[in-house]
Amino acid sequence: MAESEAKSTGKLSGFFKGVKAEFKKIVWPDRLTLMKQTVAVVVVSIVTGALIAVIDRALQYGINFLIR
């Protein structure tokens, strides 16, 4: 029983060492790049939402026209 606990503890410790090593490889963007990318994501999201809303209204109008 103690051996299996030691093995699982070793595996867990190795896992966290691996996670720590991977975190050291991360290159975080600078503030300006982060702001530009954030603005781009927000703008694309708004444009996509507006496009979906227009298509939805057009389809709704078309279906209502056919039904009535």
Image (cartoon, rainbow, N blue to C red):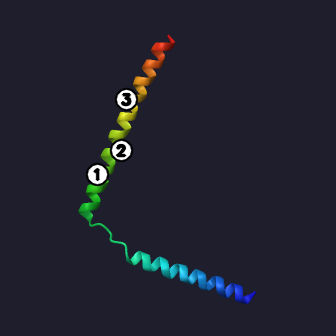
Camera-side residue of 4 and 35: 4
Mark 2: amino acid: Ser
- Return the x and y of residue 67 as percentages of the image width and height: 51, 13
- Return the x and y of residue 58 as percentages of the image width and height: 40, 23
Q: Dot 1: few (<14), some (14–19), or many (≥20) neighbours within 10 Å?
A: few
Residue at the extreme top? 68
Mark 1: amino acid: Val
List the residue tagged with mark 1. 39
Q: Which mark is residue 54?
A: 3
Q: Dot 3: few (<14), some (14–19), or many (≥20) neighbours within 10 Å?
A: few
Q: Which mark is residue 5?
A: none
Establish if 47 lies above or below 2.
above
Q: Mark 1: which secondary structure?
A: helix
Q: Which mark is residue 45?
A: 2
Q: Earlier in the sequence, mark 2 or mark 1?
A: 1
Q: Indicate the quadrant where residue 13 lies.
A: bottom right
Distance from label 3 to label 2 (Cα)?
A: 14 Å
Q: Indicate the quadrant where residue 38 lies.
A: bottom left
Side of 51 where 36 appears, left or right:
left
